[in-house]
Amino acid sequence: MDDFVAVFDADAVFLRSTRPADYLETRYGITREKLGSFFAKNARCLEGKADTKTILAPFLEQWGIGESVEEFLAEAFFSGSGIDPAVAEIVAELRKRGITCCLATNQDKHRMAHLDDHLQIREYFDQVFVSCEMGMKKPEHGFYQAIQAHFPESKLAFWDDQPSNVAAAMKCGWTAFVYTEAAQMRSEIDQLLATL
């Protein structure tokens, strides 16, 4: 079905993920107030313009974490990523019906390598769009426009858990939904397909 493309976020949508800030506070007791400068610098990593390992090292020392960067990232990656079987089932069903399904995610190169190596995440989708490979991230309009350029004649529907990313997609002309659960997603998809 070439006139409809379903686009899914990774973390907290296709993946059952722990938000980085929640993970750091739960595991290490680092409050959100202490994380602001790290996340600001890490934004460049999500665009492929800096390396998380380089940026992270001084913060581990500042936070009093005695692990190496590699140890820290390995634990963070494994604790924060597992495929949600209910959403994976929806994606598989859509692809069987001939609907193109894409992943659109903000990731740095190390986390994306983990998702590729350990979860083979790209195999679940027809196309994958990753911020660090595109040089831009959600919610920048260029991110959505670059994806849309691949499907100029199609209606794009998008699910993301972040309202700011959903709002940006809608400003670019996409149909977009704030993801809460697979059952709601399935209902939204049924309604969309009924209008085609």
Image: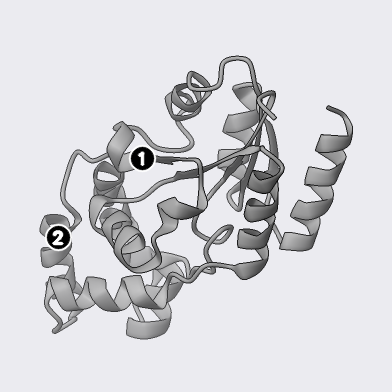
Q: Nearer the viewer, residue 43 or 103?
A: 103
- In the depicted view, which residue is nearer to us: 102 or 133? 102
Residue 64's image quarter? bottom left
Residue 15 placed where, x, y %? 52, 63
Q: Which residue is mark 2?
A: 53
Q: How dense is the environment of label 2, judged by Cα within 10 Å: few (below 14), some, or many (20 and up)?
A: some
Q: Nearer the viewer, mark 2 or mark 1?
A: 1
The residue lying at 56 percent from left, 58 percent from top is 14
Q: Quadrant of the N terminus?
A: top right
Left or right, residue 92 beside residue 119? right
Could you tell me residue 31's position as x and y percent? 38, 73
Residue that badge 1 annotates: 131
Res. 59 image quadrant: bottom left
Mark nearer the N terminus (2 vs 1): 2
Q: Considering only vertical position in the picture, is 67 above or below 127?
A: below
Query: Element type at marker 2?
Result: helix
Which amino acid, by three-letter code, is at mark 2?
Lys
Residue type for callout 1: Ser
Which image quarter is the C terminus in?
Answer: top right
Q: Residue at x 61, y 60 (%)?
A: 88
Give the secondary structure at mark 1: helix
